[in-house]
Image: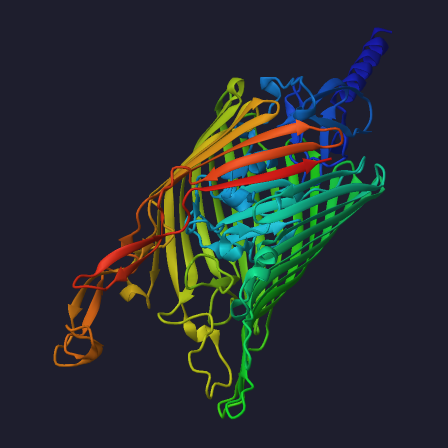
Amino acid sequence: MNLKKNALLTFILLISLLAGAQKFTVSGFIYEKGSKETMPGAVVFSEALNIGTTSNDFGFYSITLPAGNTKLIYQLVGYKAVEQAIDLKSNMVIHIDLENESTTSEVVISAEKKEKISEDSRMSTIEIPIDQIKNIPALLGEKDVLKVIQLMPGVQKGSEGSSGFYVRGGGPDQNLIILDDATVYNANHLFGFFSIFNGDALKSVELTKGGFPARYGGRLSSVLEMRMKDGNKEKLKGEVGIGLISSRFTIEAPIKKGKSSILISGRRTYIDLLIYPFLPADAKSGYFFYDFNAKYNTVIDDKNRLFVSGYFGKDKFYFKPQSNYEELKGSFQWGNATSTVRWNHIFSDKVFANTSLIFTDYKLGINFKESNTQPGDSYSFELKYRSGIQDWGAKYDVDYHPNPNHYIRMGASAIYHQFKPSAVVIKSSDEFENQTSVKTIRSYENGIYIEDDWTMTNKLKVNIGLRVSHYNNDKKNYFKPEPRISARYLLGNDVAVKASFATMNQYIHLLSNTGTGLPTDLWVPATARIKPQNSKQFAGGIVKDFSEKNFTLSIEGYYKKMNNIISYKEGASFLLVDDFEGAEEINWEDNVTDGKGKSYGAELLIQRKFGKLTGWIGYTLSWTKLKFDKLNNGQEYFARYDRRHDISLVGIYKIRDNITLSSTWVYGTGQAISLPLATFQTDPSTPSFGQDQSGLNNFIYNPTGEFYQGKNGFRMAAYHRMDIGVQFSKQLKRCERVFELSFYNLYNRKNPFYYFIDSNGSRNKLKQVSLFPVLPSVSWTFKF
């Protein structure tokens, strides 16, 4: 009897142990309360079990826990935390609504529940809250995502006012800019002074500078991923803004409440409309830009969702003076169009998949036409220039949560590129008449990846992955493996050391004379002659969460080597040819040379994302050098965008609920440029045509040459500037009104835009041209 009793007790104990070891999965979506907007990057955490996860890019989360009673905490920076008690006896689906802090006076996020960078395996990644972007003072009041990105450590700005950016020594083409999965090839309005992204339409902005996860590919230096708002599924919501040079609007509305919605957002300048009627007939000209965002999304059923989004924008400068007999007109225009169709499907409580179909089109056009109808002197001349790149792509991504220690992502992508580096057409009524064009270049770019965010121990967490990329062009195939690893090790409470290594390959190049990302820069493919760009980057650092003070500290060092980067040969330009006569086909490959580069440095970031006082302090110490066999006599030289020191101070202070004060101060070492240091006599026996001592044009015998101390051997003056702004909000009967007053370059610093040599008089003088003095701006925004 005792034997039977002992056997029964053993069996019961075994069943109890098995039951205790049983695990179930909680999954669902995290939404914003009041709009049903999905919330990516939200933390889901069991404090008692010390197990956590985050929602993916579409707000879906999955966490596997032992059976029994527990409490889950849902939180996201800027939102009120939610605690959910559950009795886990089977798999559960729980959808959570998070309430924005601005709608509640009670904020209860304890130190243990906050999102911590010390626990993340990623490094060199920065998330910027949209509210901060919209509060930071900007040039002429135009809120600009890319100018805020420039304020981050490791990111260098271009010339004065430009929205182009350079990350850890990379050029503007080495930044992968993504809007709802679609690549944006030229992100600039007004020759780079503003970006194409309307902050009113954006939901999230994330910049990755190193330690790239395997899911990203195709660029060497950074990934800037932006996601548009889905649209309010609960109620009609809108925003209208009126500024000095442009106006904007955003409308969100449910189509079927709680199930589907639409978002429409647009912006246009109107200076051209205001001044055009007052211009004289012989000087008619103008400039404008516009952009338009739209998105539709619907919940098909519990396991399927559909999103359709697009962006369309254009810049145009034109002139058409009028006279009796002569007709003269021309235009310079460029623009982007993107479209994305995405389908989310939930295979199980642990497996989430997204399928995307993507279209991207970037075009540049220059038109010039001149004709004269005067009797006896009639003629006509026409020039057309075209350039651009068009992509058709598809990608498939799967998120798999087998258990709390593993978060596996895998997927594949394919892109069909169509390049048009240059197409020139010339027509003339004179004897000289020529038509020249370049055929379209087609190529294919593919990739497959797998990565695992693996919690190996309580202290050690690793993101390890492999991407294999393939590229085909003109019967030339490239296969490139790209291993990636990023790891963090906890030293103590809220302190971690991090390290990463990433190999990147880039199969497209940007040809630029200026390095500033102008519309005339040309996108060209890797070929049998022009190899793909390649980089290897090592990074390491230490991070600390100061939970009680609500801010984080990170210090990072990096070293990056780049190979097969290309540049124009001396004297070449985007027109590709100087003499059209007799040319049958232009080969852009003959005008470029390849080389290598290296960049290394250290970065400091102190950031506070929420509270009455928010903002950050950023500092970068860096070196960037390039080497081309056919440039600068094969000697190494500093890149134009090399900066030894770069400092950014950003502060946003909420004085009262209806008054917000913000300010930025930036400092940067001057750009490296090429300027002659001296002139010298070349051959006194050879005459040249110029001004003699009497000031008359004549043949003179003192020709001179110029002496340069290598390419980019001269430094411009240091750049520094302060901006300040204040916002006043007032709740009206049917809407909220926000009035903003800001000052760009508050203390009127004359920063150099470019230098030139003034040869008037007996001595040459170096003169500086500055662009922007102190510029005040005002804007009104109405929210309903």
Instruction: State how many labels appear.
Output: 0
> Is residue 544 shown above or below 750?
above
- Residue 653 location (% of width, % of height): 52, 26
- Residue 161 location (% of width, % of height): 45, 49
- Residue 776 location (% of width, % of height): 48, 40
Of residue 438 and residue 240, the one placed in the foreground of this image is 240
Quadrant for residue 749, please give it: top left
Q: Is residue 79 left or right of residue 92?
A: left
Q: Considering the image in quadrants, where does the C terminus appear?
A: top right
Q: Residue furthest top?
A: 2
> Is residue 774 shown above or below 615?
below
Q: Residue at x 68, y 38 (%)?
A: 56
Q: Considering the image in quadrants, where does the N terminus appear?
A: top right
> Is residue 498 shown above or below 393?
above
Q: Which residue is drawn at 66% across and 20% down?
A: 49
Q: Residue at x 43, y 44 (%)?
A: 538
